[in-house]
Amino acid sequence: MTLYTSNISRRNALKRMSHAMAVASLPAVVPGSSAVLGKDLPQPHFTPKAKQVIVLYMSGGYSHVDTFDPKPRLATEHDTSIGYEFGRKDFDRYLKAANWAFKPNQHCGTEVSDLFPHIREQMHECALIRSMNCDHIDHGEATLQLHTGSTGFAMPSLGSWLNYGLGTFNPSMPGHVVISEHRPYAGPQIWDSIFLPGKNAGVQITPGKTPIANLDRTSTVKQQALELGLLNSFNKKHLVGRESDNKLRARMSSFETASGLQSEAPEIMDLSNETKATFDLYGASADNPTSYASQVIMARRMIEAGVRFVEVIDAVGACRDNWDAAHRDISSHEKYAKRVDQPAAALIQDLKQRGLFQDVLLIFCTEFGRTPWAQDGKGTKSRAHHPHAFSCWMAGAGIKGGVIHGETDNIGNKVVHDAVHVHDFHATILHLMGLDHEKLVYRHAGRDFRLTDVHGHVVKQILA
């Protein structure tokens, strides 16, 4: 049966496609579609050590000197002045002790504070980078740089670059998924594909009763297939002479992916089949899908379903209720750490017991650190934004466990050894996925672009 015939009027065609348009109403599916990839995946530049990525992103900037970078001097010289900041004469910096004690991992000795007792038990599986640094002191710009490499211009995200370079294992699912209960700093820019083909952008899943809106079919499978076939025939005809229209191509492929989502996503996002042992491991419960623990379990299920890149953004209440301790009591960290500590540690254990740890790269990160001094003067409880030094860790595929890379000075103010800029961080992630960051290039507006721009070095010391 030929679906397209020249005597079908535009009005009748639109009526017949009304049910198919329900598929198009799936939010964020258009840029996230990857059905066009089919079975022929792009080839990496060299044999990859990792096949998939999970990013656990702590929005707001946790304090490195209260979590992963112990500085005894802060305790011995608490409330002691170290002078004015950057030549300013209106603010005297008083050192502030960490609120939590540090203890070593029993296997490798890596010290982590009591904020993260569960993560500390797994640090022998992790490479801890204590020398991270970035270029901007504000949340929006630093968040943008961590995700896209740029502080000020709209550039494709890390997940988009990975999907552009490698494709997705499951054509029925988007290759790039972001689990985010609230709008983060910089908004959807941090998972957008910008000028890369639209199918590489991230699809947002909102934890709760309706993770993806409009997911239920409005017609039978057979009828929808006919409607989508008709729509596709019209779109193909319209594409003639417009072959460079990437938005139209992305729109066309989005319908196929949306249909795949309707078939597979409900089961993937349904945690009811998880065992009690799994829920106990993560500290989750089947009746609380919005908990961070449930979100991390869903991320693991996405990986099992063949999604290339999954990010879980932690923020209790978007920009108003996250790890930011600017002009706030640093003790607020305790609330957020309690949410993420057990699930993050459990994910390492779960990936290992399922045989996924050797294929999945796990990243735990934030956009910048916190000042070693009290932001609001002597005796106060807040810490300001600090892009000059912070800590992140990686685990899993291709990572050397139990190592510490980089060093900050004796108060955690500046990097003094083996600095790792965000560009180096990105170059290392791409390398683990089998991609040379200098060769992963896309030509746009007369210029070759890449995730690391003209920067970046692979941090080989943390590689297995």
Image (cartoon, helix red, strand yellow):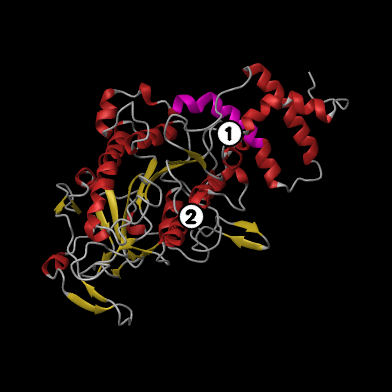
Residue 115 in the figure: left or right of residue 249: left
Q: Secondary structure at mark 1?
A: loop
Q: Categorize mark 2 by other alpha carbons within 10 Å: few (<14), some (14-19), many (20+).
A: some
Point out the tag, 1 or 2, that comes first from the N-terminus: 1
In the depicted structure, whether residue 4 falls above or below residue 43: above
Residue toward you, 124 or 15 = 15
In the depicted structure, whether residue 355 falls above or below residue 250: above
Q: Residue at x 52, y 66 (%)?
A: 454
Quadrant in which residue 3 is drawn: top right
Which residue carries the number 2 mark?
A: 186
Q: Quadrant of the N terminus?
A: top right
The reply to whether the magenta stretch includes residue 186 is: no
Q: Which mark is residue 338?
A: none
Q: Locate residue 437, reporting x and y percent.
A: 50, 57
Secondary structure mostly taken by the magenta-highlighted segment of the chain: helix
Q: Which mark is residue 26?
A: 1
**Magenta-highlighted residues:** 253-268
In the depicted structure, whether residue 170 falls above or below residue 224: below
- Cα separation, mark 1 vs mark 2, equals 22 Å
Residue toward you, 289 or 424 = 289
Residue 204 in the figure: left or right of residue 34: left
Q: Amino acid at mark 1?
A: Leu
Q: Locate residue 81, reporting x and y percent.
A: 19, 76
Residue 284 in view here: yes
In the depicted structure, whether residue 234 falls above or below residue 218: below
Q: Categorize mark 1 by other alpha carbons within 10 Å: few (<14), some (14-19), many (20+).
A: many
Q: Locate residue 155, reporting x and y percent.
A: 55, 57
Q: Secondary structure at mark 2?
A: loop
